[in-house]
Each structure stands twice: as structure tokens, then as C-alpha cells.
């Protein structure tokens, strides 16, 4: 029962990782961009949430109303102002520019908020739990998982059922021909980054309610998101959720064996899957 | 004018002048223990080790297209192997440094087999995962101090040289030697057949493949060589520091971020770039270090600006203006000297 | 002076150091069907890429309805009413047949063409509308590519090698449909390898050779000898 509990807790944790991963997966799908600063943007969203809750004195979940649009606008500006200039055949410019961005965000957060760990106060939500068949499940992890499912369903719907999603897919398929359809790819890329950072904002706030955070943890969040994407298979949003769940379960089971093994066992499971199924478990597009 | 008036050569006057000046500079640097103070020597030693790391990362990313953000895996691994080989195997520190290089090559083989399955940008993050696995694994080894790390025992430190000055000099010379060795290896490798193949791959992977160049094997070889030398440099870094911990050994900021900034600012994909970049980096650090985090933000902004506006870096700007090449790699057509000026 | 849809003056085009077009002069009158012929590498596709905005040129080198568009972005050119049926069809593989057509109409221009008109022209596409575009045969894919361009209700439509890689029967049926399309007041520019077909369908013809115009004239009034000289550069 204890082990079963670990699996369930891990699966719920996987919802958070899927949220880390969804934005990464989205922008890779649309413009083949891998954003090294993704994890730092998650942390940035958490700090924004913290500031909003403190200044306005509102519940962290209500802070989403401010942080989600703020991150989306920042994403659009970031993409059109900087990242669009780096896109092309050469892999180096986007990687190095987003790497530089990662260092800038991290140190700017250090400068503003110091290195002290912070946490958002969500009151009862943090401790509330429900009993389910002998298991005690936290309301926050359940909520996080439900949000992850909703976000991924929403992204899936946007991608395959809306004009914006059609434009995303067309630009992803063939940028030149998409331009001939009157689509300005720079604008479309900007919109995809805006959407990705809106999801990142949700991920950041939920992270900040769940655990304490400091400016240095961005790299680790990027890696978890990345592992979920690769385990699930590139270009498959539901696969990304599965990847997040697998990673979460691996971590909680590792922690059960030895607390020092939590993160390590997640990485090891990722490496094993990479060795056995290099394209992930449910691949849709080739890298 | 006949075709005999032209000759194809690798050398140039600038390169010949650079060779002479370089040799003089090297002699002056070797003599540093007799003219420089302890603090200056430490700084120069650190500079040489960063120069070595930057040249290696440049070979990896700038020439082989293997953009790694996880080279701290091998820096830290080399450092830990120095400690392990001296403490457990009783090897003299200098031998242990070389041993760390050999072990670095060995561990790089399975790592490469695994992460070469990731393409392009995902390869980069894959290298980071490996570095994290190394960090977390070494934190589990209690014999090496676990998460809090350990210091090099005094008897091992003493075994390097009897006096403190002697040790400082030795560690300075080792750092200088490592930088010279790395630049020489990188330069000779780029001039070799394999190196030419690398340039061909960089210019056009598809075409290089059709020429029968085994891209995978060439990249694999570069990755393993780079890992071995990075581990050697890592061992030297922690021989200077005399203390190691997982967070210091596998720091992405110290061993990858700074190194990437050095190469990007200096000029990626050139032998000269990392040298210029290291000099600029240390000049900035010595003048702006008081600013702390602001300094890193400035560094990040400079690197982004250079990547966007002058992707060939400072050396690229110099070369565009003066057509210089201190380490002649490309062949050039020169008019011969006995040209009578038709 | 006839009403000119397109006026090209001294158009040069480069791929890096390689110059693909040298001082092209060309005019296209409203409602006409113009053919462009020439050997591989003569610059035909480059010319169409320049007109559609996929290649940047001197702004004044290309004028459309009197306004300079040479340096204009491709998506804005498309909104002005120039559509391209690209060589090799280049449908969006992750879009269904119908989505490929709908996205063509996204420029939002008014005109006779709509989804139902396209389906009336190519009934087979209606049957297959929810399939992925990659599942169609070559000829059906070409119908989608033509339909996608028509959905924009363009003033000027550019066809690049629409017969390439298709069976003769299919080519015949596609060319039979062309007059219906262009009959609706549209101006068309057709790049075609098949000289006989290009001449039969067009009113005027330009021949390109190594990036220059080597021949220009009424399609009916040019001799075989003139064409082969202009085409191959044989004197």
C-alpha cells in the first residue's frame, strides 16, 4: 500500500512536470526552437506570482489572472524582439541566445529577490487532502494534475481545431509556403511563444505554491520538462503528460528507496528510456 | 602573367610573425615564477585553465556542431578522479591528473553512445542531464565527502613539492602546459584529415555524408577527445583549489556558462576566438567583479548582442577588417614574391 | 496603353554570390494568360519567387497594379492578391485536404472562389476532404494546390510547373480546367516545361535563358527555330 501510494503521488507530481514540458513541446513543434531559458521563465513566473500576491494581497491562484497575460505578452515581445532573429538553419544562435537569457533572468531574480528561498502562501489549499480508498491525496496535487490535463486538452484543441492551430501547423510544415497564405511567420512564432509562456505562468504559480523556490532552480525545471518531452515522444502532447507521469513516479519510488535518490532515479529512468526507445514512447514527429 | 606567379600556401606573414611572438611570449610565461607575484600567478593559472576549457568547447560546438551545455560533467569528473586516484590509489598528483584524463575518455564512450541519440538542441539538454547524474552520483559517495565534499589531504599536497612556492609554481606550469597542450591538440586536429572532414561537416552535413565522411564516427571521436582533455583540465582546476564538492565540481555557471560566453564573445569556430575571449572575460571580471550579479547580467547581454549582431565574435570583426589568421587552417592563394608587377 | 497588372523592370536576383536573374523586363496585361518557358536553371522559379515576395528585390523592380512590391514581405504580397501554385505542390502535410484549402482563403479577399466552388471544380476533393493531404495521389494533390491558390481569390495567379511528375491524362484534365479558372477575370502566369502545352494555352510567351529574357512574343506567332534558339542558346 505504501508503494502504491508512492506511485499515485508520483503520477500526480507528473502533472506538474507535464506543465513544465507543455510549453517546451509547443514551441519546439511550431518552430523547432529549444528554449534553454524555459526553466528560468517558470521560476520568473513564480516570482511574479509572489509579488502579485504580496502587493495585491490576493490568493496565489487569483494571481494567475495577472501573471498569465503578463507572461504571454513577455513571450510575444521576447520572440519578436530577439528570438525570431536567431531562427534559421544554424542551431547555435537560438541555443546560445536562450542560454544567455537564462543567465540574465537568473541573476536579475537574484538581484531583485536575493537567493533566499521563497514560497507562496495558498492557505488551506496547501494542506487540504481527501481520502480515496485508503489513500490520502493532497488537494493541491490533484488540482495540479487536473490543470495539467485541462491545459494539454486545451493546447490539443487549439492545435487541431482552431485557425491559430492551423497556422501553427502550416508554419511548422513549410515556412515559405505558409507566408504565401498571408501568414506572417514572425507573428505566428510570437503567438506560439506567448501561448507557451502563458502555460509556463500556470506551471510557475503551481510550483511556487507546492514548494519553496529560489532563482537557481530554473535549470532543474528545464531538465524535468525536457525529460517528460523526450520520454513521451516529440510532438505528442498527451505523450508529454505520460512522460511527466513516468518521471514523477520514478522520482517518488526512488525517494522511497533512499531520499537522496529522488532526482537521480528520475534521470536514470530517462536515460534508460533514451537507450531503449530513443524516439520516446509515443513519438509523432522526428527530431 | 602565368600561373606560376601564384602559390597556394597555408602560411601568411601574420601567422609567421605570430609564431615568433608566440614563442617569445611562451618563454616569458614559463619564467613567470621569477617575475610575477603569487596572486598574479594564481590569476594567470586560472586564466590558462579557462582558455583550455574554452578551446575545447569551441572544438566541440564551433567545429563539430556538438553544442554541449554539460561539459561540467567532465570538469567535475576529472576533479573527483584526481581526489580518488591520489587518496585511494596513492598515485602522485601529477600522474593522477593524467589518469583523470584517461578515465574521462573511458566514461565519455558510454555517455556519447547514449546522448548521440538526441538531435541538435535536445542533445544540448541531454548533456546537462548527464552532468546532473554525475553530480547527484558523486554526492552519494560518502568516501569522497558525499554532498559536502572533501579536501585534498595535506600529505598529498606536500608530495607535489616541499615548499609552498614550489607548489604554486608547479600548479602554474601545469595550467600553462594544459593550455598549450589543448590549443596544440585542437590546432593539429583541425589541420588533420579528420579536422578537414569536420569543417566539411560543419559547412554542409548532407554533402559531407555523400562524400563518404563518416559523420557519426568523427563527431564521436571529437566528443571523446574533448572529454578526456576537459577531465584533465578539471583535475588541474581542483588541484589548484585543493577542495572539491559536488556543487562546485559540476557547476553549470562556472564551467559551462562562462566558457560559452568566452567563446561566443571571442569568436566561435576559430582557434583564435577563445584566446581573445578569455582575455576579454578576465579583463571584464577583474574590473567589474565588484558588481556581482550585475556583472553576469552584463556578460549575458553582451553575449546575446554578439550572437545577434556579430556571430563571428570579436575575432571575426578583427579578421573581417585585417584578413588575419594567426593559426593558419585554410589555404590561401598568394602572389609569389618574384612577381615583376605586370 | 493596356491595363498592366504586373510590370517588371530590370529585375536582378541573387542567391548569395550567385546571380540568378539579370535585368528581366516583363509586362503582364490584365486578364491575359502568359507563359514562361526555359530550360532547367534558366531562372523561371526564381522569377516566380521574386514576384510572390519569397525573394527580396529592389522595390521598384516589380510593380503590381502600379505599386512597387519588389521588397515587400511575401505575406503582404499574398494579401494584395498574388497567389502561387508552387512547383512540387508543397501542400501542408499536417493539414487535411480541407484545411489546406481553408488556409488558402485566410488572406480574406472577396471573390468568386469559395470552398464549395473548389469542390464543384474538383469533386474528388470533396470526397477526400477530411483525409491528410499526403494520402492523395499526385494529381489530386495538384488539384488541392490549385484550389488553395484560388481560395485567395487572387488577381494574379502564378503556376509553377503544374504538370511536373503527373500522368498525361491528369495533365490534360488539369489544363482543361485552366480556362474555367482564368476565365473569371484573373490574370495568369504559367511556367511550363512542356513548350507545346505552354504555347497552346497562353496568348503570349517569354523564354528565359541563363537568367535573361531571350525571346518574347505572341504564342501563335513564334517559329520552332526561334524557340529552340531562345531555349538552348544554339545559334
Image (spheres, coloured by chain):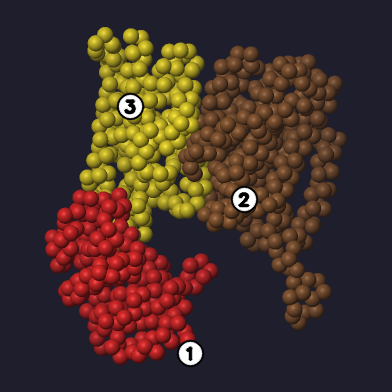
Q: Residues within 10 Å of mark 3 (few under 14, many from 20)?
A: many
Q: Quadrant of residue B152?
A: top right
Relative to B164, C170 lies left or right: left
Q: Secondary structure at mark 2?
A: helix
The answer to whether residue B317 shows anywhere in this view is yes
Q: Which residue is found at the position 62% from the left and 18% from the top?
A: B149
Give residue C186's position: percent from left, percent from top: 21, 74
- Circle 2 residue: B198
Quarter occupied by the C terminus of chain B: bottom right
On the image, which quarter does residue C224 sit in?
bottom left
Q: Is residue A19 above or below residue C160?
A: above
Q: Report in which chain the residue with disc 3 lies.
A: A
User: Closest to the observer: B82 or B217?
Assistant: B217
Give the drawing colour for chain C.
red
Q: Residues within 10 Å of mark 2 (few under 14, many from 20)?
A: many
For disc 1, the marked residue is: C235
Which lettered chain is shown in yellow? A
Q: Which residue is mark 3?
A: A15
In the rendered structure, the answer to whether residue A138 lies left or right of residue B11 reads: left
> x, y (%) of residue B206?
52, 54
Tell me the number on the disc at residue C65. Answer: none
Q: Secondary structure at mark 1?
A: loop
Amino acid at each position: 500500500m505504501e508503494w502504491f501510494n508512492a506511485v499515485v503521488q508520483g503520477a500526480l507530481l507528473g502533472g506538474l512536470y507535464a506543465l513544465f514540458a507543455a510549453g517546451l513541446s509547443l514551441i519546439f513543434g511550431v518552430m523547432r526552437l529549444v528554449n534553454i531559458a524555459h526553466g528560468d521563465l517558470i521560476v520568473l513566473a513564480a516570482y511574479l506570482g509572489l509579488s502579485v500576491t504580496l502587493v495585491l494581497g490576493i490568493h496565489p491562484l487569483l494571481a494567475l489572472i495577472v501573471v498569465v497575460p503578463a507572461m504571454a505578452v513577455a513571450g510575444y515581445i521576447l520572440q519578436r524582439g530577439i528570438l525570431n532573429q536567431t531562427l534559421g538553419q544554424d542551431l547555435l544562435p537560438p541555443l546560445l541566445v536562450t542560454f544567455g537569457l537564462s543567465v540574465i533572468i537568473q541573476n536579475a531574480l537574484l538581484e531583485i529577490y536575493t537567493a533566499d528561498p521563497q514560497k507562496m502562501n495558498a492557505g488551506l489549499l496547501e494542506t487540504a487532502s481527501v481520502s480515496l480508498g485508503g489513500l490520502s491525496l493532497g488537494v493541491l496535487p490533484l488540482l495540479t494534475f487536473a490543470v495539467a490535463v485541462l491545459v494539454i486538452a486545451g493546447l490539443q484543441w487549439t492545435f487541431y481545431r482552431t485557425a491559430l492551430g492551423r497556422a501553427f501547423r502550416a508554419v511548422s510544415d513549410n515556412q515559405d509556403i505558409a507566408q504565401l497564405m498571408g501568414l506572417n511567420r514572425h507573428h505566428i512564432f510570437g503567438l506560439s511563444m506567448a501561448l507557451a509562456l502563458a502555460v509556463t505562468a500556470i506551471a510557475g504559480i503551481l510550483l511556487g505554491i507546492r514548494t519553496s523556490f529560489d532563482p537557481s532552480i530554473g535549470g532543474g525545471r528545464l531538465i524535468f520538462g525536457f525529460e517528460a518531452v523526450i520520454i513521451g515522444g516529440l510532438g505528442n502532447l498527451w505523450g508529454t503528460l505520460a512522460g511527466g507521469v513516468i518521471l514523477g513516479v520514478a522520482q517518488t519510488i526512488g525517494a522511497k528507496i533512499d531520499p537522496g535518490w529522488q532526482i537521480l532515479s528520475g534521470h536514470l529512468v530517462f536515460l534508460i528510456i533514451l537507450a531503449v526507445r530513443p524516439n520516446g514512447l509515443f513519438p509523432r514527429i522526428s527530431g | 602573367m602565368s600561373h606560376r606567379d601564384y602559390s597556394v600556401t597555408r602560411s601568411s606573414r601574420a601567422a609567421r610573425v605570430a609564431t615568433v611572438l608566440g614563442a617569445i611570449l611562451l618563454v616569458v610565461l614559463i619564467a613567470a615564477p621569477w617575475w610575477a607575484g603569487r596572486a598574479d600567478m594564481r590569476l594567470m593559472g586560472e586564466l590558462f585553465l579557462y582558455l583550455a576549457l574554452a578551446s575545447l568547447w569551441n572544438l566541440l560546438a564551433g567545429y563539430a556542431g556538438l553544442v554541449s551545455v554539460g561539459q561540467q560533467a567532465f570538469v567535475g569528473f576529472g576533479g573527483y578522479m584526481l581526489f580518488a586516484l591520489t587518496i585511494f590509489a596513492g598515485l602522485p598528483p601529477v600522474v593522477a591528473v593524467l589518469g583523470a584524463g584517461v578515465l574521462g575518455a573511458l566514461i565519455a564512450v558510454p555517455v556519447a553512445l547514449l546522448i548521440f541519440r538526441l538531435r541538435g538542441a535536445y542533445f544540448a539538454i541531454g548533456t546537462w542531464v548527464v552532468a546532473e547524474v554525475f553530480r547527484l552520483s558523486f554526492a552519494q559517495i560518502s568516501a569522497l565527502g558525499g554532498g559536502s565534499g572533501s579536501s585534498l589531504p595535506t600529505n598529498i599536497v606536500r608530495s607535489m613539492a616541499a615548499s609552498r612556492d614550489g607548489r604554486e609554481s608547479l600548479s602554474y606550469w601545469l595550467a600553462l602546459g594544459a593550455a598549450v597542450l589543448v590549443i596544440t591538440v585542437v590546432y593539429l586536429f583541425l589541420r588533420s584529415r579528420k579536422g578537414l572532414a569536420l569543417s566539411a561537416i560543419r559547412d554542409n552535413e548532407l554533402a559531407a555524408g555523400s562524400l563518404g565522411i563518416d559523420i557519426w564516427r568523427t563527431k564521436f571521436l571529437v566528443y571523446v577527445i574533448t572529454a578526456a582533455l576537459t577531465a584533465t583540465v578539471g583535475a588541474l582546476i581542483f588541484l589548484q583549489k585543493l577542495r572539491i564538492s559536488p556543487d562546485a565540481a559540476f557547476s553549470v555557471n562556472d564551467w559551462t556558462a562562462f566558457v560559452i560566453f568566452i567563446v561566443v564573445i571571442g569568436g566561435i569556430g576559430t582557434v583564435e576566438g577563445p584566446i581573445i575571449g578569455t582575455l576579454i572575460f578576465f579583463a571584464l571580471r577583474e574590473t567589474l567583479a565588484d558588481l556581482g550579479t550585475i556583472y553576469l547580467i552584463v556578460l549575458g547581454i553582451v553575449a546575446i548582442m554578439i550572437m545577434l549582431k556579430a556571430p563571428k565574435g570579436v575575432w571575426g570583426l578583427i579578421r573581417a577588417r585585417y584578413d588575419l589568421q594567426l593559426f593558419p587552417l585554410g589555404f590561401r592563394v598568394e602572389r609569389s614574391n618574384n612577381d615583376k608587377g605586370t | 496603353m493596356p491595363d498592366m497588372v504586373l510590370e517588371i523592370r530590370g529585375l536582378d536576383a541573387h542567391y548569395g554570390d550567385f546571380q540568378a536573374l539579370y535585368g528581366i523586363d516583363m509586362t503582364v496585361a490584365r486578364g491575359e494568360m502568359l507563359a514562361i518557358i526555359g530550360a532547367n536553371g534558366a531562372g523561371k522559379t526564381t522569377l516566380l519567387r521574386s514576384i510572390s515576395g519569397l525573394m527580396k528585390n529592389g522595390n521598384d523592380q516589380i510593380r503590381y497594379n502600379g505599386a512597387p512590391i519588389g521588397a515587400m514581405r511575401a505575406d503582404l504580397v499574398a494579401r494584395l492578391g498574388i497567389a502561387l501554385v508552387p512547383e512540387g505542390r508543397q501542400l501542408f502535410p499536417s493539414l487535411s485536404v480541407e484545411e489546406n484549402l481553408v488556409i488558402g482563403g485566410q488572406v480574406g479577399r472577396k471573390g468568386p472562389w469559395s470552398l464549395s466552388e473548389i469542390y464543384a471544380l474538383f469533386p474528388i476533393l470533396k470526397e477526400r476532404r477530411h483525409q491528410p493531404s499526403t494520402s492523395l495521389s499526385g494529381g489530386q494533390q495538384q488539384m488541392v494546390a490549385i484550389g488553395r491558390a484560388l481560395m485567395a481569390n487572387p488577381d494574379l495567379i502564378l503556376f509553377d510547373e503544374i504538370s511536373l511528375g503527373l500522368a498525361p491524362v491528369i495533365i490534360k484534365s488539369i489544363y482543361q480546367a485552366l480556362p474555367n479558372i482564368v476565365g473569371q477575370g484573373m490574370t495568369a502566369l504559367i511556367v511550363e516545361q512542356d513548350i507545346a502545352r505552354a504555347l497552346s494555352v497562353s496568348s503570349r510567351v517569354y523564354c528565359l535563358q541563363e537568367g535573361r529574357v531571350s525571346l518574347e512574343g505572341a504564342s501563335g506567332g513564334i517559329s520552332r527555330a526561334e524557340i529552340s534558339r531562345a531555349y538552348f542558346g544554339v545559334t
